[in-house]
Image (cartoon, rainbow, N blue to C red):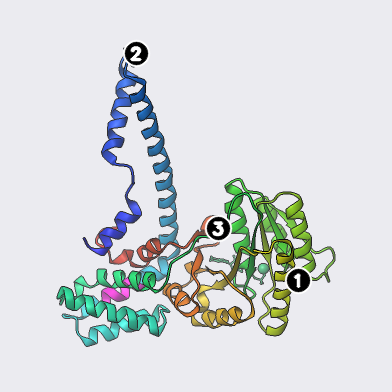
Amino acid sequence: MGFFKKLKERLFTLKVDEKKEQKNKISKENKKTSKVSDSRPSSVKAKEIKLEKKIEKEKLKRRKKEKKIDKYVAGLEKSGSSFSQRIKEIQSKHNEIDEDFFEELEEILIMSDISVELVVDIIDAIKREVKIENVSDPKLIAEIIADKMFTVYANKSVVDTTLNYEDKRLNIFLMVGVNGAGKTTTIAKIANSYIKEGKKVLIAAGDTFRAGAVEQLAVWADRVGCDIVKPVKSSADPASVVFDALLKAKENNYDLLIIDTAGRLQNKVNLMKELEKINKIIQREIPEAPHESLLVLDATTGQNGVSQAISFKEVTPLSGIVLTKMDGTSKGGIVLTIKEKLELSVKLLGLGEGLDDLQEFDLDAFIYGMTKGLMDESR
Ligand SMILES: Nc1nc2c(ncn2[C@@H]2O[C@H](COP(=O)(O)OP(=O)(O)OP(=O)(O)O)[C@@H](O)[C@H]2O)c(=O)[nH]1
Ligand SMILES: [Mg+2]
């Protein structure tokens, strides 16, 4: 089975057997229309109810997954269409898969912000596959490209993208990143998704440097309906805000505390000291926290963002990356580069400005969004 077919199956197939679902539906219909009371044994009826519940659960899961895939497709519209367009161009330009073809393919991958090292790996893998499968028609190569982008990414290391959130404890997420990367909006989006799950969320306005930062966060907190701890006076130290927030969160049994910070990379030593201080205060209260230290990066800054991330990694321990503004770039390959260069997983993707446009990273959905234009039919 080809890669695209397998990918679509993973993304769109319902786990529960569709035949079983149909059978269950028919038996339910019969029951409704029949005037005779249901005389079947109770074990049969119980089994039917169990299956029905399972089907409903799977359906809900599928709806959620479909919504996520739609978000990915919309958010990766720029990247996906430009990537697919360029691949199609070289497919029709070349009659055979030769060195010239590979050179142009290499350029396309590099142009989409995939690092040179990764491009070399991907091209090598494609070349091997082309040889093994004896493929000579460029029209047949799209699937191999998508497949190898996927496997090179997945094979490099374990792809752990789930956030370290657990029930029955105070979870602490620390957000870092340079000004304008999207920290504040990302905090609002994360808060919103946990609030929607019924969790009690508190935000700490730890960016006390930029005028207006606290107020901007307060507006978001109000909009998503969560509580916020602000500095008591404008000159307050971020560490004191974090301390107050920790006390409030512990006393009032919050599920999640998200901490906003200022990202002034201009002064690395100060930034390092400040983050060290914040971490120390958190660990004095909860030794294993922060449970996530997420670096927020603007995807539109491309390779610059990667250098920025490397600098941040030097000043503070990080547990993952949030890549924002993916909808604003046509170079989606940055996702692959970040993992390669930083040995950190992209845990969340910002696919738009809306509150539910922040999505957990999903390699299948990402590759689908990037290469959908190359597939024969859309679904
Ligand atoms: N299109 C798009 N815009 C985004 C996304 N994430 C954030 N933004 C926008 O990016 C801009 C900056 O976001 P902020 O959240 O204020 O960034 P910040 O890192 O908190 O910035 P400072 O507080 O100045 O340090 C805002 O206009 C957001 O709406 C995204 O995923 N897609
Ligand atoms: Mg901010």
Q: In the image, which residues are magenta?
A: 83-89
Image quadrant in which the N terminus is located: bottom left
Task: Identify the element where label 1 is drawn.
Answer: loop
Tell me whether the residue at label 2 lies in contact with that at label 1, contact meaning CB atoms closer than 8 angstroms. Answer: no
Q: Number of marks in the image?
A: 3
Q: Seen in the image, is 301 located left or right of residue 250?
A: left
Residue type at the position of mark 2: Ser
Ligand 2, seen in the image, is in the quarter at bottom right
Q: Which residue is mark 2?
A: 37
Tell me whether the residue at label 3 lies in contact with that at label 1, contact meaning CB atoms closer than 8 angstroms. Answer: no
Give the foreground label among 3 and 2.
Answer: 2
Residue type at the position of mark 3: Gly
Is residue 330 a member of the stretch shown in magenta? no
Task: Examine the image and state in which quarter residue 236 appears.
Answer: bottom right
Mark closer to the chain start, 2 or 1? 2
Residue type at the position of mark 1: Ala
Image quadrant in which the C terminus is located: bottom left
Q: Seen in the image, is 264 located left or right of residue 327?
A: right
* Residue 211, label in figure: 1
Q: Position of residue 239 (x, y in %)?
A: 77, 69
Q: Seen in the image, is 151 located left or right of residue 313?
A: left
Q: Position of residue 142 (x, y in %)?
A: 26, 71
Q: Which residue is mark 3?
A: 354
How much space separates mark 3 and mark 2, taking CA atoms?
Answer: 51 Å
Going 71% across and 49% down the picture, which residue do you hit?
253
